[in-house]
């Protein structure tokens, strides 16, 4: 009962910081809130996020998981993420020529709004068949997502800035088992090894944590992006609108911070 009451609470304007350390900031809030968008540090290193897909996708998995807020198609998610990468021609938001990963949205939906110089469709192969629509003979075994290079200025995009060199080329299918059945804490929980692969491919860590790249996830769910960032020696800035998920993200990120602290001390 307490959980259901907490789920129904709307976050306060400007959000509420639930957790703040050298490694992680976690805000219970609405990522469309201009005060929250303005609070993300300028020139951050990676946008890595898994927004609602706008399809009320719940995979027929009973009522163990609540419906995801913002999943009813009423929110223009590429438009929201455009504000997180920063406005045209400024250095606000994501640093120039840095990367984005967005689950559930395709390059043609994101290239314009997020001003991507180059983009690719990637596949997460879950090595397993989900339940999905049980009337179909094919069960979902993968999710699509987009990788892109954010280029601030149109003139730079015209000069092909943002095109990546060939030495970074890898296959577009990433194979990682989904979080085990019954163990997933969120209906769309992403595996930590997958998130670490993305983060480590697109950011760097430094000797001093304050110099390591900052990874931003405005739709954090249970905090998988943050856990992966912290375990990889990066910093994270997370926002989640559902109070119970935001609290879960705090618990998981705190556990990752204890491991990261131990690894740093060793
Ligand atoms: C697809 S799930 C993310 C799951 C996450 N990748 C994980 O591993 O747990 C999307 C999340 O976005 C959250 N969300 C929806 N609308 C939001 C908003 N306006 N601001 C912040 N979070 C929002 C939902 O509550 C949900 O937890």
Image: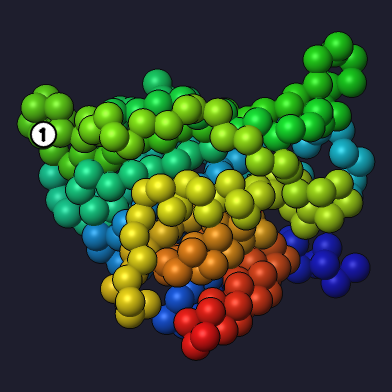
Quadrant of res 5: bottom right
Pinpoint residue 61: horizontal percent, then vertical percent.
87, 39
The reply, left or right, for residue 194 in relation to residue 126 is left
Pinpoint residue 105: horizontal percent, then vertical percent.
51, 30
Say how many tags the image has.
1
SS at circle 1: helix
Pinpoint residue 101: horizontal percent, then vertical percent.
44, 41
Q: Residue at x 75, y 62 (%)?
A: 7
- Residue 182 position (above or below residue 102): below
Task: Quadrant for the N terminus, please.
Answer: bottom right
User: Can I make out residue 30 in this image?
Assistant: no
Check disc 1: other Cα within 10 Å, few if <14, some if 14-19, many if 20+. Answer: few
The reply, left or right, for residue 153 in relation to residue 73 is left
Name the residue at the bottom extreme: 265
Q: Residue at x 49, y 64 (%)?
A: 232
Q: Is mark 1 within 8 Å of ligand 1?
A: no
The reply, left or right, for residue 46 in relation to residue 186 is left
Look at mark 1 in the image and give the residue it sits on: 156
Q: Residue at x 89, y 21 (%)?
A: 134
Q: Which residue is at the front of the view, 229 or 113?
A: 229
Quadrant of res 36: bottom left
- Residue 46 position (above or below residue 23): above
Q: Residue at x 82, y 67 (%)?
A: 3
User: Can I make out residue 190 in this image?
Assistant: yes
Pinpoint residue 85: horizontal percent, then vertical percent.
31, 48
């Amino acid at each position: 009962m307490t959980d259901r009451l907490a789920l129904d609470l709307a976050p306060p304007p400007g959000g509420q910081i639930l957790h703040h350390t050298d490694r992680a900031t976690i805000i219970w809030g609405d990522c469309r809130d201009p005060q929250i968008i303005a609070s993300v540090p300028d020139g951050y290193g990676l946008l890595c996020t898994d927004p609602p897909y706008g399809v009320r996708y719940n995979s027929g998995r009973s009522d163990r998981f609540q419906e995801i807020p913002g999943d009813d198609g009423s929110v223009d998610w590429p438009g929201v993420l455009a504000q997180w990468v920063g406005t045209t021609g400024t250095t606000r938001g994501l640093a120039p020529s840095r990367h984005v990963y967005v689950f559930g949205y395709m390059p043609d939906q994101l290239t314009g709004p997020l001003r991507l110089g180059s983009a690719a469709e990637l596949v997460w192969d879950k090595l397993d068949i989900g339940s999905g629509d049980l009337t179909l003979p094919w069960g979902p075994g993968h999710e699509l997502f987009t990788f892109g290079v954010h280029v601030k200025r149109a003139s730079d995009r015209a000069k092909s800035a943002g095109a990546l060199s060939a030495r970074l080329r890898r296959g577009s299918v990433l194979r990682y088992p989904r979080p085990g059945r019954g163990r997933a804490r969120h209906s769309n929980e992403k595996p930590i090894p997958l998130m670490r692969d993305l983060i480590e491919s697109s950011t760097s860590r430094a000797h001093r944590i304050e110099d390591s790249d900052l990874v931003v996830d405005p739709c954090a769910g249970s905090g998988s992006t943050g856990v992966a960032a912290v375990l990889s020696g990066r910093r994270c800035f997370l926002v989640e609108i559902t109070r119970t998920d935001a609290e879960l993200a705090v618990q998981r990120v705190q556990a990752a911070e204890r491991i990261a602290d131990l690894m740093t001390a060793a």
